[in-house]
Image: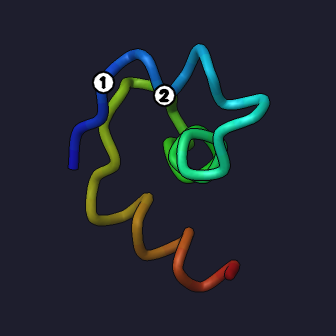
Amino acid sequence: IGAPDVARKSNHYDPAGAMFNYADVNHDGRIDKQEFGSFMKSV
């Protein structure tokens, strides 16, 4: 799952960007299966 860099810059008022930033544990701009799994468990 990829997302444009825009989401990261606007995440202070963009819920989707904030969620993405939160789920992207190692901040490589991608959410891998492991990150996604732990994110889904925490929600």
Could you say where residue 19 lies in the image, as x and y percent from the top left? 61, 53
Instruction: Please tell me in which quadrant of the rendered image residue 10 appears.
Output: top right
- Classify 9 as above or below 14: above
Could you say where residue 17 lies in the image, as x and y percent from the top left? 55, 40
Dot 1 alpha-carbon crowd within 10 angstroms: few under 14, some 14 to 19, many 20 or more: few
Dot 2 alpha-carbon crowd within 10 angstroms: few under 14, some 14 to 19, many 20 or more: some
Residue drawn at x 56%, y 69% is: 39
Q: Look at mark 1 in the image and give the residue it sits on.
A: 4
- Classify 36 as above or below 42: above
| Dot 1 amino acid type | Pro
Judge by depth and name the residue closer to the eye, 32 or 6: 6
Looking at the rendered structure, which numbered label has been put on residue 40? Answer: none
SS category of the residue bearing label 2: helix
Residue drawn at x 38%, y 24% is: 28
Could you say where residue 25 lies in the image, as x and y percent from the top left? 56, 42
Report the label total: 2
Residue drawn at x 55%, y 51% is: 16
Q: Look at mark 2 in the image and give the residue it sits on.
A: 7
Work out how far the residue at label 2 is from the one at label 1, CA to CA, in angstroms.
6 Å
Judge by depth and name the residue closer to the eye, 27 or 3: 3
Q: Are marks 2 and 1 in contact (CB under 8 Å)?
A: yes
Q: Is residue 37 left or right of residue 15?
A: left
Residue drawn at x 34%, y 48% is: 31
